[in-house]
Image (cartoon, rainbow, N blue to C red):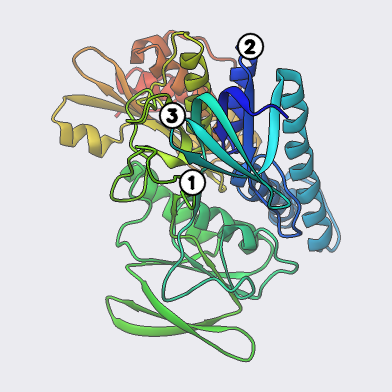
Amino acid sequence: MSSQFDVIVIGGGPAGYPCAIRAGQNKLKVACIDEWKNHDGSYAFGGTCLNAGCIPSKALLESSELYYRTQHEFAVHGIKVGNVSVDVAAMQKRRAQIVKQSTMGIASLFKGAGVTGLQGHGKLLSGNRVEFTDKDGKKQELSAKHVVLAAGSSPVELKSLPFDGERIVDSWGALEFESVPKRLGVIGAGVIGLELGSVWRRLGAEVLVLEALESFLPMTDGAVSKEALKHFKKQGLDIRLGAKVSGADRTKTGLMLKYTDASGEKTIEVDKVVVAIGRRPYSKDLLSEGTGVQLDERGFVKVDHECRTNAPNIWAVGDLVRGPMLAHKGKEEGVMVADLIAGKVSEVNYKAIPSVIYTAPEIAWVGQTEEEVKKSGRAYKVGSFPFLASGRARAMEATAGFCKIVSATDDDEILGVHIIGPMAGELIAEAVLAMEYSASTEDLQRTMHAHPTLSEALHEAALNADKIAIDFPNR
């Protein structure tokens, strides 16, 4: 194998592997180093997202929602079924197959783009050199004109509740339960905690969610947060805010969780605990002395708006740098960097990054919340439309939630779009495109939407912002 490359990417997750592929498409000589190792010891490209995050969690969310709907919704449609049971082993087998197909696909994409895929550990040395340690522990020094750091992130561990891989697990461990726990504790009511809690609640677990913050989903629009909390509690998720976990004692059958809330110290027994309090940049043994690459106080690699570090020809993307830890944000950064290295014009619009929580109902948003716009002092208007008034949503028996648009009063620019309801993660794409082109509320009003569709809810919300909605009273 050659030791000289135009570009070396350290990290093969959703930021790293697209960067490597685009660099290959740009006719550059590329190597991508990734050290992801599965629980069985096998190596795989794709990072947390494909192996233990985005993809496997969506597989289980889909399976568990089908089970829940079979039990609670099919009868309304006139579909009668007998006794329904869960085969967790079959469900997990399907999840594993989907993950395998996804990760194997990266190897094919690498081959097509001429990327050299290397499995093992990559460490940046001074002078644009990279130390590669392969699966057998053999070291080799590589060099490149450009090096892209894309090492991703790892789960944050509670000092008072360290992972043991059995009763106290991270998000990856929660995706691989072999049976449905009777009582499941989830520490953290963020995106990961709510998605994992939803999976096992639908399958029959009693789920307790302990959140240290007093507010629920503070990163979402206030109206969305309020609506979401109502529906999650209705589904049986026991969500307790302002609950700070201090530790746990092992019992014969599980764990006695200890936490403190406004009323004092409390304990509650659970079988397993999922710690989902966030993620931190993964920079373990990534940088040697003398590279010149700077980290901030939280461990993120410092970069400019084009993902350049302060060291010449060293770049960093994805969860390793500032901004939301989202796979699609990392992907676009990786592609941008690969194009910039090739001398092309490229950028990422950080004002139009969508976020999605894949619960039921789904939650999605882009841009500013109403609270953020109000705090900025800019005059604004709001339009909303409930899915209860959507013919398509009623036909789907999915009327929970609404679409909400926040726009500027002066020039009608769309400042933020917030959706809670069916297929919110798909619907938000239209809003992202609109904001990418600095569209106005009127632009959405004059965009014809097929009938009957869920997307009409976004159209009606835009009309409602100017009090001219057709299918809902204007207030």
- Asked if residue 368 is positioned above or below residue 133 in the image, the reply reads above
Report, in whole angstroms, how far the alpha carbon at label 3 lies from the one at label 2: 19 Å
Residue 3 appears in the figure: yes
In the foreground, 98 or 337? 337
Q: Residue furthest right?
A: 82
Q: Please identify the quarter of the rendering in which residue 240 is found.
A: bottom left
User: Which residue in the structure is indicated by mark 3?
Assistant: 315
x, y (%) of residue 44? 72, 44
Mark 2 Cα within 10 Å, few/some/many (few <14, many 20+)?
some
- Quarter of the picture holding the C terminus: top left
Distance in Å between CA atoms under marks 2 and 1: 27 Å
Q: Helix or strand or loop: what does disc 1 sit on?
A: loop
Residue at 54% x, 65% y: name it: 236
Q: Please tell me in which quadrant of the rendered image residue 183 appears.
A: bottom right
| The label number, if any, that marks residue 27 in the structure image | 2
Residue 325 visible? The answer is no
Q: Residue, x 69% and y 26% (percent of image)?
A: 2
Front-most of 427 and 280? 280
The x, y position of residue 26, in whole percent, is 60, 12
Count residues near mark 1 (Cα–Cα under 10 Å), then give few for <14, some for 14-19, many for 20+: some
Which amino acid type is marked by label 3? Trp
Q: Which numbered disc flags the more N-terminal residue, 2 or 1?
A: 2
| Spot occupied by residue 23 in the image (x, y as percentages of width and height) | 59, 18
Residue 426 versus residue 177: which sits nearer the camera? 177
Q: Earlier in the sequence, mark 3 or mark 1?
A: 1
Element under disc 2: loop
Is 160 or 261 nearer to us in this picture? 160
Mark 3 lies on a secondary structure that is strand
The label on residue 286 is 1
**Looking at the image, residue 233 lies above or below residue 387:** below
Tag 1: amino acid? Leu
Give the distance between the C-alpha atoms of the residues marked 3 and 1, in whole angstroms.
Answer: 13 Å
